[in-house]
Image (cartoon, rainbow, N blue to C red):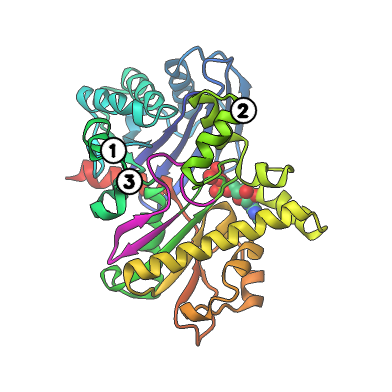
Amino acid sequence: MLILVVNAGSSSLKYQLINMEDESVLAKGNCDRIGIDGHVSHKTADGRTVDADCNFPTHTEAFEKLVEVLTTGDAAVIKSMDEISAVGHRIVQGAEVFDKPCLVTPEVIDKIDELRELAPVHNHAHALALRACTAVIPKTTPQVVVFDTAFHQTMPPKAYMFALPYEDYEKYHVRKYGFHGTSHRFVSAALAEAMGKDIKDLKIISCHLGNGSSITAVKGGKCIDTSMGFTPLDGILMGTRCGAVDPSAVTFVADKHHFTPDEMSQYMNKKSGFLGVSGISSDNRDITAAAEKGDKRAILASEMLAYEIQRYIGAYTAAMNGVDAVLFTGGIGENSWEVRERVCTDMEYFGIKIDKELNKATRGKLMKISTADSKTEVWIVPTNEELLIARDTLALISK
Ligand code: ADP
């Protein structure tokens, strides 16, 4: 059984074709630069590729190209789209409307589009992609939407409310939603399995560290708090995002620079974080390299990241009244031994002790890196959001 997983943005359409018999990826790629010019890059499991400039005025032409590269030419992996059992779409914002995956209908697409005010960059693009996909793929192929926010819908009001006047929540739906939910759900379940425990009995702090980063407290398999908020800007500092800052600093800086709200948002989303603090790069590898050479602002950015993560570990240990395991995932979490070591230094009070050699030697694979006498286990757990979307899609169409 084949499931096509689609992650559509405003100018890109990333995809993976997954064989659910063994959960292997048959092909993956990206139809990029939609609305600009167009480019397709496609790669099959056995190494055949397509890399070509195209014309993608809209998502529809991009989907047509996706169908073309999957079904025709030297890098085809299927003869017809009828071989695909379903399409699973990643959707960023489901708000309070969607707390689990669901089948795509015209009403569901309209609702996702209506939520665009809460996720201006993403939701409208998702709706465009869903409509384009519906027009291009066979009418008999079911489509499923899986939401980044859904896993966080179990947070209690005391965790998700902001102390703004209550009417802003009622009228404008201003609250914490949380993001990366599919990743946190995938890695926390994978960790419970690796630990040989029932997730219902575990208190896990899941640190997804990438260009965007978030930390989630998972108690008994449910999210009870998370670091990202109303948008993916909140929480710890990221590649180009500032994370949480005093709201008064925001209005003060906007005033000094004579920024409109949109300009201030760009400033906090694109020019801050690692990039803003270091003045060097948004990429963790560049920051680590510059810090090793003694660059003061790169050292500061590295220290800020580790310190902010430590504070969340402290906060979420309190929120859950304990912690059994801390996990690292995402590009930084899976690959940067330096970040993991810094986070796990001087954390004995929380029962955290890692095997430094093992930590240094491990990259991108499932591994316990805490010592045998560490009260809290520490793990690296590679994430795979596409696979979870495919599993959710399969589960829903099998019902
Ligand atoms: P996104 O949030 O866009 O999905 P990723 O999860 O791919 O991002 O994470 C990107 C981050 O991971 C970058 O900061 C990059 O420097 C970091 N990263 C990737 N590979 C390594 C590595 N081998 N060592 C250290 N950091 C890495």
Please tell me which of labels 2 and 1 falls first in the chain: 1
Alpha-carbon distance for marks 3 and 2? 27 Å
For residue 206, what is the image quadrant?
Answer: bottom left
Residue holding disc 1: 95
Compared to residue 340, the image places residue 124 above or below, namely above
Specify the quadrant that holds the C terminus: top left
Q: What element carries label 3?
A: loop
For the N terminus, give its image quadrant.
Answer: top left
- Going by the numbered disc 1, the residue's amino acid type is Ala
Q: Mark 2 points at which residue?
A: 257
Tell whether position 35 is magenta.
no
In the picture as drawn, the residue positioned furthest to the left comes out as 399
Disc 2 or disc 1, which is closer to the eye? 2
Numbered badge on residue 162: 3
Q: Which secondary structure, mark 1? A: loop
Q: What residue type is labelled 2?
A: His
Position in image of residue 310 (x %, y %): 52, 65
Near mark 3 (Cα within 10 A), the count class, few <14, some 14-19 or many ≥20, is some
Q: Give the range drawn in magenta.
A: 215-236
Q: Answer whether labels 3 and 2 touch (C-beta < 8 Å).
A: no
Q: What element carries label 2?
A: helix
Image location of residue 168, percent across then percent down:
27, 35
As measured in the structure, the alpha-carbon distance from the residue carrying label 2 to the one carrying label 1 is 32 Å
Could you say which is closer to the camera, residue 31 or residue 199? 199
